[in-house]
Amino acid sequence: MPEVRNATLVLVHGAGGGAWSWELLGKELDARGVDHVEIDLPTMDENGDPMADFHTDAACVRSVLDRIDGPVVLCGNSYGGIVITEASVGHPHVKRLVYVAAFMPDADEEVVSVLMTNCTPEFVAGLTLSPDGRGGMDPEAAKNVSFDQASPEVADWATSQIRTMAMGSGGSPTVTGVGWREIRVDRGPLTAGGHSATLGSRAGQRVRGGPVRPLSTDLAPR
């Protein structure tokens, strides 16, 4: 695959996460000599714009892609799948997309509906809403649905860093474009953790280049 040889792996975290979400994976990538960039999405900035939404996050990712010289493999986890779906559209640097336990919205699907209908009841029950309107996840619930196969030490470390998320201003409810319709997806999304099996079955009808792989694992990448 010469088009992805020496590519930079750009990693986009899920809701409540940050660049820290990929810290343990980053060590493995360093050991293998793989260039990688982890992004902090602006909706997770608790001092940022409360009106930020997934379009804001997609624009942030796209600005990072613009600054990379050479091919990119763009990877999203969980909510990050929505972000990379929009951010990748028509971008000349993006040669592959990887969805890891991630959402893959289509052009006519409202994002909130995609999120809520493809999460397990246990995951939905753990969601919180702060007085200032930011969404979040109860740390103990996160241990059970997102980090249930992590060691207690890793689960404590991760949940201590979970942040709340700006919910946006009620703008366009759908993605502005669908990158997976034009860019090869080497593997289907891994269905895991708080995401229902519906996510995998829906994605299996769309992904080119590889099957959906349901795994017995939790939601968070490590």
Image (spheres, rainbow, N blue to C red):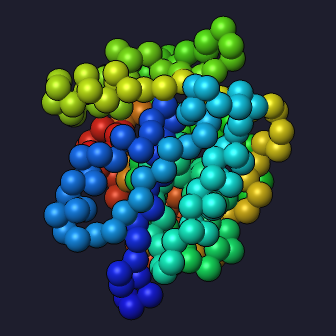
For residue 22, say whether it is visible. yes
Q: Residue furthest top?
A: 131
Q: Is residue 21 left or right of residue 77?
A: left
Residue at 82 percent of width and 44 percent of height: 172
Q: Is residue 135 left or right of residue 76?
A: right
Q: Position of residue 204 (x, y in %)?
A: 49, 62
Residue 62, by quadrant, is bottom right
Against 59, residue 20 (above or below) is above
- For the N terminus, which image quadrant? bottom left
Residue at 59 percent of width and 56 percent of height: 61
Residue at 46 percent of width and 45 percent of height: 13
Task: Say how many tags the image has.
Answer: 0
Q: Residue furthest bottom?
A: 2
Q: Nearer the viewer, residue 211 or 151?
A: 151
Against 167, residue 221 (above or below) is below
- For the C terminus, which image quadrant? top left
For residue 145, say whether it is visible. no
Q: Position of residue 152 (x, y in %)?
A: 17, 24
Q: Is residue 218 left or right of residue 162?
A: left
Residue at 82 percent of width and 33 percent of height: 170
Against 34, residue 37 (above or below) is above
Q: Position of residue 66 (x, y in %)?
A: 61, 69
Q: Position of residue 100 (x, y in %)?
A: 41, 53
